[in-house]
Amino acid sequence: MNLGRVYFSQNQQLNHAAINPVFSLLSSVVGEMKIAGMYRFMEPAEADRLFADLQDMPTVGREAHVERLLTTERPNVIVVVLESFSGKIMSRLGGLPNVAVNMDRLADEGVLFTNFYANSFRTDRGLAAILGAYPAQPTTSIMKYPKKVDSLPMWTRQLRNEGYDLAYFYGGDADFTGMRSFLVTGGFDRITSDQDFPLKYKLSKWGVPDQYVFDATLRALQTQRKTPFLYVVQTSSSHEPYDVPYHKLKDERLNAFAYTDDCLGRFIAQLKRLPAWKNTLVVLVPDHLGAYPKDIDYFDFSRYHIPMIWVGGAVKSPARCEAYGSQIDIAATLLSQMRLSYRSYRFSKDMLNDQVRHFGYFSFPNAFGFVDAEDSVMYNCDNNQVVADQGRRRGYNLPYGKAFLQKLYDDLGNR
């Protein structure tokens, strides 16, 4: 039973009233039992001390240290969430050429974040990081707990409160893994999913191919009257089994990535023709770790290295940001550019603020990774062993990674 299926309103009291109270109570109790007491690596005071070194707590005047990337403080925002993309398929990040050719071109046109990392291995956890600035958990997903999601200070809802018009576009099942309740809580009252497309377009295991999702988004943009707006487009065609209506590359995985990249390129070309383009920021970011090559495993740092690109008429000029970060940092970085408060996002940091420590965090089944310019470490919580450690200061980031995960589960348990 997916509790999120009954969410229908921006009024959370109405959504909670629609949920079976007995089932909800049992679900909550079982969930709390699984979370309580997990990942106790150190004394609470030591975890607090280490975690404090990692936080970005904005203060008055801090913005003086932040490079301004945008021409406006209230741009239209379009976030494109790209299924399973990674640096492995982008030549601008040292990956293969001739696969994500449009992503490579857009990286040259906009701002490319070169040391950016996925937070997780699953879409539900990735969306919570991208849209809710909440780190991925190695044993569960906050999306499974609607009442915990209610307490997240999601930046999408913050923009709605600032007057933004919100819409979400996805070719798959919006009720999968509690996604609908998450989006409704995040302020989205217009959610387009597989149910909203003609049956003839449902051509793949995951629903509607990306080209039709981008087409639906473009039609909505052409009739969008209220500004500013926030649109989120989630792709799915580059997910296994990689069955796409496109034939360019022999490798089925690479061909699926090339297909989504082609759809994206066509979408951006059409978007540039709209009057809204000059005031629009497009954020391109994958949903989670990469799926290429086929045999890559969880303990390869490069699997978590993903692109983030900011492009659009609202971007001042092409640039590269070499600061380390991950999907949870989108919130603070974007809100800082808009001169909006991000104090509520305790795990997020402004990647353009030179006064804070920059790092990337990620998790996968019962393990975590913590990376920065000096040390990259992975830790297996099943056997309490370091499985990878590289850089000039090996071992330095291990206590910080442990403290981060411990504080994350403290936070999750208290929500």
Image (cartoon, rainbow, N blue to C red):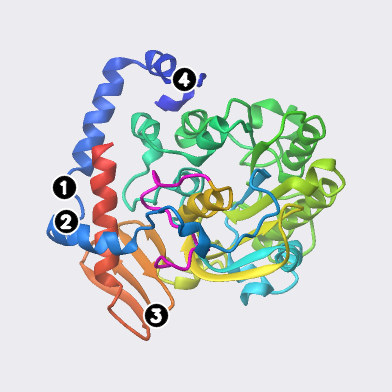
The answer to whether the residues at label 1 and label 3 have Cβ atoms under 8 Å apart is: no
Question: Between marks 1 and 4, how big is the CA–CA gap?
Answer: 31 Å
Q: Nearer the viewer, residue 53 or 241?
A: 53
Of pointers 3 and 2, the one earlier in the residue sequence: 2
- Residue beneath the point at 28% across and 77% down: 396
- Residue beneath the point at 21% across and 55% down: 39
Q: Is residue 210 left or right of residue 132?
A: right
Of pointers 2 and 4, the one earlier in the residue sequence: 4
Q: What's the mark number on residue 6?
A: 4
Q: What's the mark number on residue 37?
A: 1
Provide the residue span drawn in magenta. Answer: 340-358
Label 1 vs label 3, nearer the camera: 3
Q: What's the mark number on residue 40?
A: 2
> What secondary structure is found at the residue carrying circle 1?
loop
| Residue 53 picture quarter | bottom left
Of pointers 3 and 4, the one earlier in the residue sequence: 4
Q: At which x and y percent is residue 182?
A: 47, 33
Instruction: Name the amino acid, label 2.
Output: Arg
> What secondary structure is found at the residue carrying circle 2?
loop
Within 10 angstroms of label 3, few (less than 14), some, or many (20 or more) residues?
some
Q: Nearer the viewer, residue 200 or 364?
A: 364
Of pointers 1 and 4, the one earlier in the residue sequence: 4
Instruction: Name the amino acid, label 1.
Output: Gly
Within 10 angstroms of label 4, few (less than 14), some, or many (20 or more) residues?
some
Q: Is residue 341 magenta?
A: yes
Q: Is residue 47 above or below residue 38?
A: below
Question: Between marks 1 and 2, how big is the CA–CA gap?
Answer: 7 Å
Q: At which x and y percent is residue 379?
A: 29, 68
**Given the current orientation, which residue lies at the most extreme front position?**
61
Instruction: Name the amino acid, label 3.
Output: Glu
